Amino acid sequence: MTRKIRWGVLGCADIAAKAVIPAIQSSRLGRVTAMASRDPAKAQAMADRFSITKAYGSYEELLGDPEVDAIYNPLPNHLHVPLTIRALEHGKPVLCEKPIALDATQAMELAAAQKAAGLPVAEAFMVRHHPQWKKARALVAEGALGEVRAIQTIFSCHLDDPANVRNQADIGGGGMLDVGCYAVAMARFLFDTEPVRAIALMERDPAFGTDRLTSGLLVFPEGRQLALTCSTQLALTQKVTVLGTRGRLEIPIPFNAPADQPTVLLFDDGRDLVGGGREEIAVEAVDQYREQADAFCEAVLFGKPLTTGLEDAIANMKAIDALFRSAESGCWEEP
């Protein structure tokens, strides 16, 4: 019988409670056996909710537990790198929430620590594990859309609570790091190459200081483009359109596909504007968080390659950094 990975979770983030812990608990290869929070009562409440054996009142206690095999780090963005490095120092592989770091320099510091430790570290872009994205990439690669030259992505939500970590600029809040990072990551995934220049307009909340609305362009080799809009203060919206010379592909729920419902990709060959060339491509229901957890467990247990490593995470942060620099300079910037 295959041994199961015993997971420890740092903090009581919403994403952990709503998606990742339930996914790990139902996964093939893992179980959450320990929770930690700086508030012991919160750790115990989360442990009770999910039948987790141990609850710690500090991160260090959990990291030092010899019966914890791997760490899930969903802490606020400014704690991604330091707590992941600390976990590595304790000999624990880490699945760390996106964005992997506040900037590319931090991400490279983490990569150096990971190399020294020789342990798996992955950025938790769960969407890479959903078959709708694998199918979209296959369609692009096989030329079903012709030459793909443009991707348009919108990702927005509405968060106005000052206590929400996404509204706290000093700890890495703001729309670009929270939701815009998906647009960058998945354009790089579909184009299968890195951007060469970037330009952005960014509007900041006058009270929070966070970027609440960003529109940007990333230009890839041969003139291919990602046009993105992301926001933390607009109506909830997700949409990706991939445009080729012989067709377009729409992903209606690209990032938070429901775990219990099939999804569809919408292909249109562009013969008219009323859907004459439209085809729905059905994709089975999948819990992308569970797929992510099992993939990481396979890396830990069997040495299987990670879907993407820290080199990819660094490249994503370089592109995001260029968008931030462009918003300040008003000029094109290179990643």
Image (cartoon, rainbow, N blue to C red):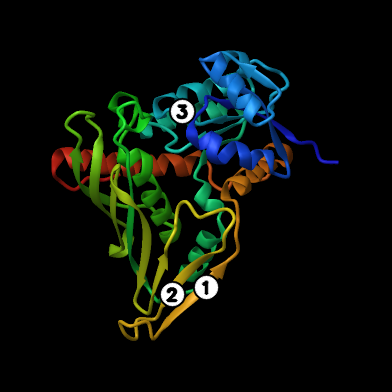
Q: What is the total number of numbered labels drawn onto the structure image?
A: 3
User: Which residue in the structure is indicated by mark 1?
Assistant: 281
Q: Secondary structure at mark 1?
A: strand
Which image quarter holds the C terminus? Answer: top left
Other-residue count near label 1 (Cα within 10 Å), few / some / many at <14 / 14–19 / ≥20: some
Residue 5 showing in the rendered view: yes
N-terminal label among 3 and 1: 3
Q: Is residue 208 left or right of residue 121?
A: left
N-terminal label among 1 and 2: 2
Disc 2 versus disc 3: distance between alpha carbons? 38 Å
Q: Which is nearer the eye, 40 or 229? A: 40
Q: Which is nearer the eye, 325 or 158? A: 158
Residues marked 1 and 2 touching at CB (< 8 Å): yes
User: Which residue in the structure is indicated by mark 3?
Assistant: 80
Residue 94 in picture, x, y percent from top left? 58, 31
- The image quadrant that residue 245 belongs to is bottom left
User: Which residue in the structure is indicated by mark 2?
Assistant: 267
Q: Nearer the viewer, mark 3 or mark 1?
A: 1
N-terminal label among 2 and 3: 3
Residue 118 in picture, x, y percent from top left? 62, 30
Which residue sits at x=63%, y=25%?
47
Residue 97 in picture, x, y percent from top left? 49, 36
Compared with 106, 41 (above or below) is above
Q: Is residue 176 left or right of residue 190?
A: left
Task: Indicate the amino acid at tag 3.
Answer: His
Disc 3 versus disc 1: distance between alpha carbons? 37 Å
Task: Indicate the amino acid at tag 2.
Answer: Phe
Which residue sits at x=41%, y=60%?
191
Which image quarter holds the N terminus? Answer: top right
Disc 1 versus disc 2: distance between alpha carbons? 7 Å
